Image (cartoon, grey):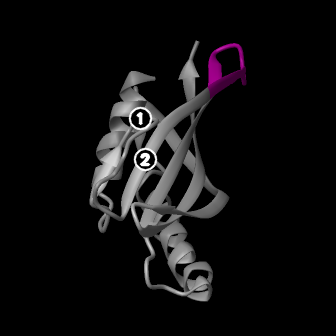
Amino acid sequence: MKELIDKLKTELATIGGFQEVFMYRGAEPKEYPALICNWESSNNSFETNQENMRVATFKIYAIVNVSGKSQQSIDEVVIPKLYDKLSAYFDENWNGNTVEGHRTWSVLSLANSSMAIEDKNKIAYLDCVLEIKYLKDN
């Protein structure tokens, strides 16, 4: 799991347009847009007597300053563009790569979007769930 987390951290840092990337809960970005990612859970099931299907689930929070933007613009443009950027990245860069010598594939889904006022700034959050699946030899 450590290798998977390290690889994800490296990969997230290469996504263009994000000023800061954190891999732990409670991070407090100073610059936006920012990404916060943390490992939520891990599951496995035996596919055959030789292979084990592993699924690691991560929460990814994309955070952007939306001060001065209308609610319509936030909901119709800003949040969808954040999701499209993350989705396109994982579609292009994760399918077919390997972790611990095993092929991985990912599924990114929208979990929730929300807004808050922080330090006089209006901040929008896009919460995504990333599942990374791979087969591991028993």
Residue 19, x across and y down, in percent: 27, 60
The circle on residue 24 is 1
Q: How many marks?
A: 2
Note whether 134 is above or below 90 in the view shown. Answer: above
Residue drawn at x 29%, y 43% as measured from the top left: 10
Which residue has dot 2 on it?
36
Q: Considering depth in this image, is 126 or 66 the residue closer to the camera?
A: 66
- The span picked out in magenta is 42-53
Q: Mark 1: which amino acid?
A: Tyr
Q: Considering depth in this image, is 134 or 33 the residue closer to the camera?
A: 33
Note whether 138 is above or below 90 in the view shown. Answer: above
Circle 1 crowding by C-alpha within 10 Å: few under 14, some 14–19, many from 20: few
Q: Report the side of 44 relative to 56 (left or right).
A: right
Q: Mark 2: which amino acid?
A: Ile
Q: Report the side of 21 relative to 105 (left or right).
A: left
Residue 33, x across and y down, in percent: 36, 64
Q: Secondary structure at mark 2?
A: strand
Is the Cβ of the residue at disc 1 closer than 8 Å to that at disc 2?
A: yes
Residue 105, x across and y down, in percent: 54, 46
Q: Considering only order in the chain, which callout, 2 or 1, is on the residue closer to the N terminus?
A: 1
Whether residue 80 is visible: yes
| Majority SS type along the magenta span | strand
Residue 122, x across and y down, in percent: 47, 70
Q: Secondary structure at mark 1?
A: loop
The circle on residue 77 is none
Dividing the picture into quadrants, the one containing residue 48 is top right
| Residue 20 falls within the magenta-colored stretch | no
